[in-house]
Image (tube, helix red, strand yellow):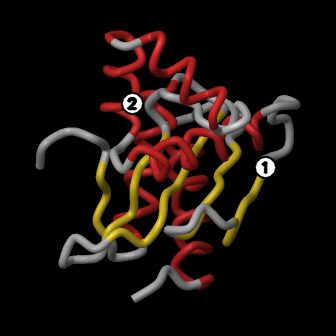
Amino acid sequence: MSLTLAQAATIVDASLAKGHELKLNPLTVVVLDAGGHLIAAKREDGASLLRPEIATGKAFGCLAMGFGGREMARRAQAMGPFMNALSDLTGGKAVPVQGGVLIRDAAGALLGAVGISGDLSAKDEEAALAGIAAAGLVADTGDAA
């Protein structure tokens, strides 16, 4: 199974709705398929300049390493030189912080990732979790279930 445009659009719209509910700063939401290709993205009015690149980097980094943003953040703290090398290897495309979440189906198969940027990383992640749930899919934050 692959992530559909309809599912990606639901993730984006539900994530933005959660951001509004939580009164977050303007968000940018990016959904990538399992191969790292863009499926859907929206940048809210007032979102700052690099938000699309940061959101993409959060999702891309998760796909590149195979785990969610929480684990990426932990490894960035513990393994700075490795994360610097990862950044170099990806041309700066991997952003190792919360707000990047892997998207899985009910059987655990990887479908893609969502990245959100605009507020504190933990709040970005909260919006991502709502979006993934709204699409009927499973979020993988990098923490054990």
Question: Up-down: is 90 above or below 8?
Answer: above
Between circles 2 and 1, the one closer to the viewer is 2
- In the image, what residue occupies the spot 29% across and 76% down? 105
Q: Is residue 102 left or right of residue 115?
A: left
User: What is the number of the mark on residue 93?
Assistant: none
Label 2 packing within 10 angstroms: few (<14), some (14-19), many (20+):
many
Task: Give, as a three-letter code, the residue at label 2.
Answer: Met
Determine the CA span between mark 2 and mark 1: 24 Å
N-term-proximal mark, 2 vs 1 = 1
- Check disc 2 and report the residue beneath it: 72
Tell me if residue 5 comes above or below residue 74 in the rendering.
below
| Viewer-proximal residue among 51 and 84 | 84
Q: Up-down: is 41 above or below 33?
A: above
The residue at the point 66 percent across, 27 percent down is 88
Residue plotted at (28% across, 74% down): 109
Q: Secondary structure at mark 2?
A: helix
Structural crowding at the residue carrying mark 1, measured as other residues with C-alpha within 10 Å and reported as few (<14), some (14–19) or many (≥20): many
53 and 8: which is toward the camera: 53
Q: Position of residue 143 (x, y in %)?
A: 20, 39
Expressed as whole percent of the image width and height from the top left, the position of residue 37 reads 66, 67
Give the residue at mark 1: 43
Query: What x and y, as percent, mark residue 83?
Result: 49, 21
